[in-house]
Image: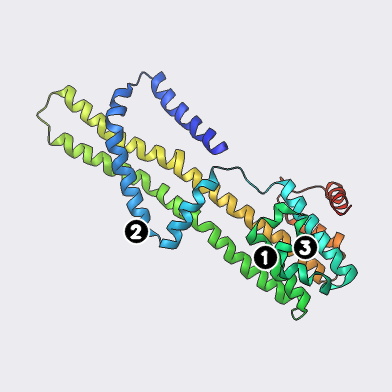
């Protein structure tokens, strides 16, 4: 929603300012289609050349998600921590073996089924159940689990940043492709140097439209999208770090309520629930 609103503001302010300054849209309308064809075509070609098939597929698949709001809200984190508290409480009360069946088949687990918002996220559930399975086996100590978690989170973060990097590379190249389009317009103008001054002026103005569009698309549309993709990647990594802190605290012998506090403190302050707020939510879910 904010992406569309931001784009509308960019267009309204840029072209509104141009109109207020007395600019004529006829030149832009005449030159823009050809200039856009050159700039966007060159940018797409460079994108295909500079990225692997895996990156290209991941980027196009990720683009629609950027138009949606962030799913990493306080409500989601409270559900996540309520789930972890429920699991750790049962394991502490009835033993780790009591959650083995839930961990091995989370899709049919009554325990995980109480938290559909979290259960619907396949990657997050896989992360949680993998390390709960290790805790049930009892073959790894806290330091080994922490090192393994760090490696997996680093890998996840690197993969999550791939679309952002690919989009940013396109944004960085757009001003240069705008210059290419402008230079081609200048070449065309110089070939018509004998024409009337009014005609030459129109041709030069049309050539400069390429530079204008390249810069506008780079800094008004594509680069902000890459920055948003990076923020979303950071949020997804932060969620895994919350799970990591909670489970490690439990492995080290802390009670579920204390382990939950380790995870809560990891979260960004804008989404972090208060201690009393989280405690009330957890008790309500258990009830």
Q: Is 257 situated left or right of 13 in this image? A: right
**The disc label shown at residue 196, or none:** none
What residue does disc 2 label? 49
Of mark 3 and mark 2, the one earlier in the sequence is 2
Picture layout, residue 273 above or below residue 129: above
Task: Tell me the distance, in whole angstroms, between the alpha carbons under discs 3 and 1.
Answer: 13 Å
Q: Is residue 130 shown left or right of residue 59?
A: right
- Can residue 269 be seen in this snapshot? no
Q: Residue at x 78, y 79 (%)?
A: 138
What residue does disc 3 label? 246
Residue at coordinates 63% horizontally, 61% vertically from top-left?
A: 123
Looking at the rendered image, the quarter that the N terminus falls into is: top right
SS at badge 3: helix
Q: CA distance from mark 3 to mark 2?
A: 43 Å
> Outermost residue, front direction?
108
The picture places residue 180, in percent across and down from the top left corner, at 27, 44
Among the 4 quarters of the image, the one containing residue 199 = top left
Task: Pick whichever of labels 2 and 1 is earlier in the sequence.
Answer: 2
| Occupied quadrant, residue 190 | top left
| Residue holding disc 1 | 127
Residue projecting furthest to the left: 194
Residue 76 visible in image: yes
């Amino acid at each position: 929603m904010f992406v569309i609103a931001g784009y509308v503001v960019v267009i309204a302010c840029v072209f509104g300012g141009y109109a207020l300054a007395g600019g004529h849209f006829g030149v832009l309308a005449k030159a823009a289609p050809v200039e856009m064809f050159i700039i966007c075509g060159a940018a797409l070609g460079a994108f295909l050349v500079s990225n692997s098939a895996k990156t290209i597929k991941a980027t196009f698949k990720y683009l629609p998600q950027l138009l949606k709001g962030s799913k990493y809200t306080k409500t989601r984190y409270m559900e996540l921590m309520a789930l972890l508290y429920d699991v750790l409480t049962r394991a502490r009360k009835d033993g780790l073996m009591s959650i083995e069946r839930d961990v091995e088949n989370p899709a049919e687990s009554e325990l995980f089924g109480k938290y559909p918002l979290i259960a619907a996220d396949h990657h997050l559930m896989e992360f949680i159940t993998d390390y709960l399975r290790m805790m049930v086996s009892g073959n790894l100590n806290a330091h080994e689990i922490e090192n393994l978690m760090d490696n997996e989170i680093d890998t996840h973060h690197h993969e999550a940043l791939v679309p952002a990097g690919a989009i940013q590379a396109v944004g960085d190249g757009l001003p240069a492709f705008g210059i290419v389009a402008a230079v081609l317009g200048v070449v065309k103008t110089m070939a018509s140097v004998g024409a009337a001054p009014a005609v030459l002026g129109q041709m030069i103005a049309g050539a400069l439209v390429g530079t204008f569009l390249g810069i506008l698309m780079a800094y008004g549309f594509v680069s902000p999208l890459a920055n948003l993709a990076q923020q979303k990647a950071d949020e997804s990594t932060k969620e895994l770090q919350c799970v990591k802190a909670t489970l490690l605290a439990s492995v080290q012998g802390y009670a579920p309520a204390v382990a939950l506090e380790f995870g809560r403190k990891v979260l960004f302050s804008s989404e972090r629930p208060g201690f009393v707020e989280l405690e009330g939510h957890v008790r309500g879910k258990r009830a």
